[in-house]
Image (tube, rainbow, N blue to C red):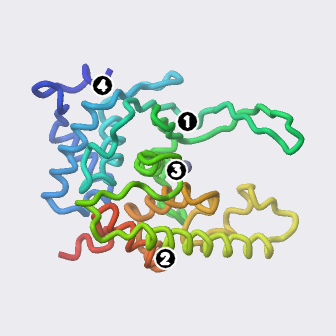
């Protein structure tokens, strides 16, 4: 579908993103605009490769045009800017829904009874399968929000985490790219930050007025001073994905709250977003 929208280059190892579309896209993403010219040009090449390699399709009646596809590709490629397109191997399709979509779920309770239900979600990455995102959520970054929400970076970093099995916050480390990462130090930094966030969440819930449901939107303001969206407290896989959103988009609070974890992320992604624009 996308391939008919933009001219293909050579043997389709890349899809050309027109200059004006590239400029508009970057200008609207301050955390991408902060990259120097060389990195921006590398990001563009990677985005063109991603668009050629992955099949991007719309679902639920959405019309997917080239600006939308480029916006998704640019955000998707930021985490692999210094890793390479090969880190998104093993799966081939990106599906974009107009808004949150319903996913069938199944849980077995303690007495062995299976409950089937549907859950509305804004994105999902299936192991070996497609990556699904909601267009409404891609656009849904509110500047005054406590955390910078980025469903594209979230789902794509789950894909990195899934390269070595179920998402657990520990992606594979490459001997050449990551000689200084010690997996034990990674696990310790991840675990400590995760536990500290959950301790803070527990404290907030304890102090919350009893008429407020801690899982409702009425509770949101109570979590606002947390360094990360409380969703990161679900498990270490979510902690890695939510941390990655902040790492790339709005890293200050993440680095202040969890400097060791920020340092590990910086080693893994081979980027230091806090140092951008200082040169
Ligand atoms: Zn997630």
Q: How busy is the neighbourhood of tag 3: few (under 14 within 10 Å), some, or many (20 plus)?
A: many
Labels 2 and 3 touching (C-beta < 8 A): no
Label 2 SS: loop
**CB of residue at label 3: within 8 Å of ligand 1?**
yes
- Mark 1 to mark 4 CA distance (whole Å): 20 Å
Which mark is in front, 3 or 1?
A: 3
**Left or right: where does residue 223 sit relative to residue 260?**
right
Residue 167 is tagged as 3
Residue lying farthest right? 111
Image quarter of residue 36: bottom left
- Mark 2 to mark 3 CA distance (whole Å): 21 Å
Tell me which numbered mark, 4 or 2, is placed earlier along the sequence.
Answer: 4
Q: How busy is the neighbourhood of tag 2: few (under 14 within 10 Å), some, or many (20 plus)?
A: some
Disc 2 marks which residue? 258
Disc 4 marks which residue? 2
Labels 1 and 2 touching (C-beta < 8 A): no
Q: How busy is the neighbourhood of tag 4: few (under 14 within 10 Å), some, or many (20 plus)?
A: some
**Left or right: where does residue 64 sit relative to residue 230?**
left
Residue 276's x, y, as percent? 26, 70
**CB of residue at label 1: within 8 Å of ligand 1?**
no
Front residue of 181 and 67: 181
Tell me which numbered mark, 1 or 2, is placed earlier along the sequence.
Answer: 1
Q: Is residue 232 above or below residue 46?
A: below
Label 3 SS: loop
Residue 194's x, y, as percent? 58, 69
For the N terminus, which image quadrant? top left
Labels 1 and 4 touching (C-beta < 8 A): no
- Mark 1 to mark 2 CA distance (whole Å): 32 Å
Q: How busy is the neighbourhood of tag 1: few (under 14 within 10 Å), some, or many (20 plus)?
A: some
Disc 1 marks which residue? 99
């Amino acid at each position: 579908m996308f391939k008919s929208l933009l001219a293909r280059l050579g043997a389709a190892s890349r899809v050309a993103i027109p200059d004006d579309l590239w400029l508009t896209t970057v200008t609207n993403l301050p955390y991408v605009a902060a990259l120097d010219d060389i990195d921006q040009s590398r990001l563009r090449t990677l985005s063109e490769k991603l668009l050629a390699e992955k099949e991007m399709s719309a679902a639920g009646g959405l019309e997917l045009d080239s600006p939308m596809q480029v916006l998704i590709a640019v955000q998707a490629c930021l985490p692999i800017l210094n890793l390479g397109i090969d880190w998104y191997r093993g799966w081939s399709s990106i599906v974009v829904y107009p808004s949150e979509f319903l996913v069938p779920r199944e849980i077995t309770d303690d007495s062995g009874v299976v409950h089937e239900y549907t859950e509305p979600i804004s994105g999902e990455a299936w192991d070996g399968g497609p990556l699904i995102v909601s267009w409404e959520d891609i656009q849904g970054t509110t500047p005054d929000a406590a955390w910078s929400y980025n469903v594209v970076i979230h789902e794509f970093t789950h894909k990195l985490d899934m390269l070595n099995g179920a998402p657990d916050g520990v992606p594979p480390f490459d001997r050449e790219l990551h000689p200084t990462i010690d997996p034990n130090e990674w696990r310790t930094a991840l675990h400590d930050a995760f536990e500290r966030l959950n301790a803070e969440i527990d404290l907030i819930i304890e102090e919350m007025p009893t008429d407020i449901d801690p899982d409702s939107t009425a509770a949101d303001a109570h979590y606002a001073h947390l360094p990360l969206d409380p969703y990161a407290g679900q498990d270490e896989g979510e902690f890695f994905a939510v941390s990655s959103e902040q790492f790339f988009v709005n890293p200050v609070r993440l680095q202040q709250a969890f400097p060791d974890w920020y340092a590990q992320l910086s080693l893994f992604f081979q980027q230091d977003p806090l140092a951008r624009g200082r040169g």
